[in-house]
Amino acid sequence: MRNPANSQLKPSRRRFLRGCSVALALPWMESATSATTRAASVAAPPVRTAFIYFPNGVWEKAWVPESKGKDYQLSPSLEPIADVKDSVIVLSGLDKKNSHGGDGHYAKTANFLTGLPVAKTTGKDISSGGISIDQLIAQHTSQFTPLPSLELGTEPVISGIDSNVGYTRLYGSHISWQSATRPVAKEINPRLVYERLFGKSITADSERAESYNNLLDYVLDDAKSVRKRLGRDDQFKMDEFLDSVRGVEKRIEFTMQKGKTDWAPHLDESLIQQAKPGVPADFREHIAIMMDLIVLAFQSDSTRVCSLMFANDVSGRNFSFLDGVKGGHHELSHHENNEEKIAQYQRINRWHTEQFARMLKKMRDIREGDSTLLDNSMIVFGSSMSDGNRHDPDNLPILLGGKGGGTLQSGQHIAVDGMVPLCNLYLTMLRKMGLEADQFGDSTGVIEGV
């Protein structure tokens, strides 16, 4: 039975205040847990999982390290993870045999997190083979968080038929599946993600804005009251968390308010892509905000499972913002062994890795007791094919960031031999989370050494 006296001594971990309909969760804090819980388990932080997908594969010669084990040397495309190398496992040799029979991209993208055969169809009878790994994890963790899971992207779902290969384009827009026939809708608008996480809309409406100025100012008095009850280390942690939330909020506001001042720079209309309201026109900012929102979601324990698609497959995303790159990722992935195209393709691969490294560094800087948010996470980063020119679903480019709550042997390159399913990694992750699964997808066992 709950002790009323104890409830007055310890702040609620799930909210700042009562009666204002703000569902802002707090980061994990040891001093915010009960004395009984601390004595029993020192309030161990939970393990979070994320699955971050980029399309079109990689230039393997610049991706796969030449050596393996703890002393491996980073390849050119992986050099950006140098500062977090000890928290990353590089995996090579993993395959998706159930994608061998599918032409093009679709039979490889849709089953990135299921590992099972994708039904070739142009109509509504879609099938990814089964539930995706993120949604299976969500079934076990949703009881502990306000949101079961968070599915993010940067491009809207594309329908219609790709007549070149006879597949519905829908398959190129989803990696998360509640069931074989039911993809999970992804959110591409950072503002809506923010509102979903923190329960209060960001608005430019003057009357509403005046009523509370912004989310954090609105709850500041109650937040200060909670802060007084925390230990010194957790006070620093709360300050850091509030600063992070305010920072993301301001960045979203800024990107949404561009062009609403009295003065605006001259813009070439042909350069403005068809960005929907609320979606940043700058792809770099879009990706950065989405990844920061994942960090906030994990830091606040709003959810413990996220997925993010950098782009849909067969996307026309242009990467000319990178020095030395002229054109779209999909086009350049079909390099035909042209050295000029390969060089640009590899620059895009490296940029993707830079975004992953940036996210891991941010997670590493967030303390959770004697560990960090990165220590208590497992972040899969990869693509559904190796070389985009061959559409090859074998030897997939896969990185696993974080230490899984101390269960992962990070800081190494694991090169597996033979036809080892990607789902062996997913089964390994399930086991690391304490879920007694015998199989997932087409798994044949766990990956030793992870």
Image (cartoon, rainbow, N blue to C red):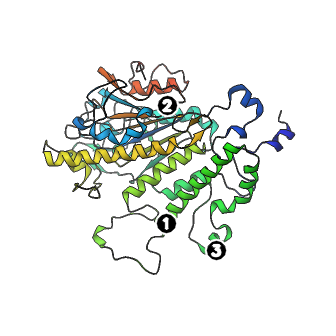
Task: Measure how far apart labels 2 and 3 are at the Cα level.
Answer: 46 Å
Which one is in front in this view, the residue at disc 1 or the one at disc 3?
A: 1
Which one is in front in this view, the residue at disc 2 or the one at disc 3?
A: 2
In the image, what residue occupies the spot 74% across and 53% down? 17
Q: Amino acid at mark 3?
A: Glu
Q: Amino acid at mark 2?
A: Lys
Q: Which mark is first along the chain, 3 or 1?
A: 3
Q: Amino acid at mark 1?
A: Phe
Q: Nearer the viewer, residue 14 or 62?
A: 62
Q: Is residue 110 above or below residue 161?
A: above
In the image, what residue occupies the spot 39% across and 47% down? 355
Q: Which residue is mark 3?
A: 207
Q: Which residue is mark 1?
A: 254
Q: Is residue 41 left or right of residue 444?
A: right
Q: Which residue is mark 2?
A: 403
- Quick one: SS at disc 3? helix
Q: Position of residue 308 (x, y in %)?
A: 43, 45
* Among the 4 quarters of the image, the one containing residue 95: top left
Q: Quadrant of the N terminus?
A: top right
- Give the class, few, some or many, for how many residues have Cα within 10 Å of label 2's Cα (few <14, many ≥20): many
**Mark seen at residue 407:** none
Q: Position of residue 319 (x, y in %)?
A: 28, 55
- Quick one: SS at disc 1? helix
- Quick one: SS at disc 2? loop
In the image, what residue occupies the spot 35% across and 34% down? 398
